[in-house]
Image: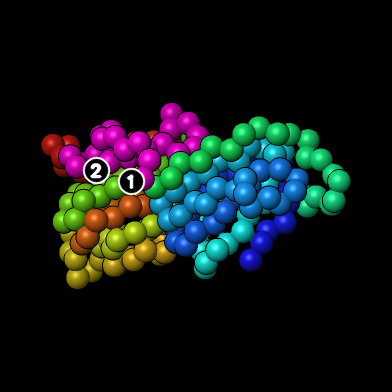
Amino acid sequence: MTVQPHYHKYDEFATIASGTIIFGQGEVIDESKGVAVSAGGYITIPAHTAHWAKCTQDATVVRFAPGPRELTPLKAGEKAPGNQPFKIVQAKDVPWEDAPGMVKGVKTVLQYGDPAKGPYIILLKFPKDIFNPPHYHTADEAVTILSGTMITGEGPQVSDAAGMSVNAGGYFIIPGGTTHWGRATEDVVLNRLGNGPRDIFYLDAKK
């Protein structure tokens, strides 16, 4: 499948959850100048910049834009109003660092936005068997599992039996102020959108 040249009025941010997509910049499709981005990679496309895409296999994308959903197609010979370069990060090049305020071993990278204000998007990496104790955030969060499996549950009491197992491609929404916990049953990478300041409050302050 090929998505014809177009642009958006707002920045577009996309994380590849599965499959591979070739992204190209410009008003004309030229696959020799496209970049293939596979699962775990991500791309930022500036507002008003012409681009196109081609799926080389079935693919799932987690997409965010800080404004209304819209798309302006480009006819032959038309020019987009902007031409800022893409930012592409392949999965192997993700600059992981320790996740601030979280349990030891969790890694993160900021993908988009300002965590001090929101909205923002981060990736989080949980090693197998790591446990994230009961906690809450001020802002709502939307989580998509990119790889691996995580058991997540609501409330201050931890029970794997009462939790829900979420696999790659699944997602969950947690309202701000809602206590929840998570356990990685295998290595997990997830995409997390927060609609306000980034914070985390563990019920056990020693965590």
What is the number of the mark on residue 110?
none
Q: Residue at x 52, y 52 (%)?
A: 36
Position of 147 compared to 49: left or right? left
**In terms of depth relative to the viewer, which is nearer, 197 or 46?**
46
**Could you tell me if the residues under marks 2 and 1 are in contact, i.e. CB atoms within 8 Å?**
yes
Mark 2 vs mark 1, CA separation in Å: 7 Å
Label 1, on which residue?
124
For the record, the magenta segment spans 92-116
Residue 185 occupies which quadrant of the picture? bottom left
Label 2, on which residue?
106
Q: Position of residue 86 (x, y in %)?
A: 59, 38
Q: Position of residue 71 (x, y in %)?
A: 73, 51
**In terms of depth relative to the viewer, which is nearer, 164 or 65?**
65
The type of colouring in the image is: rainbow
Q: How many marks?
A: 2
Instruction: Return the residue found at the far front.
Output: 32
Magenta region includes residue 98: yes
First along the sequence among labels 2 and 1: 2
Q: Position of residue 10 (x, y in %)?
A: 66, 40
Residue 49 occupies which quadrant of the picture? top right
Position of 16 compared to 34: left or right? left
Identify the amino acid type marked 1.
Leu
Q: Position of residue 165 (x, y in %)?
A: 29, 67
The answer to whether residue 158 is above or below residue 114 is below
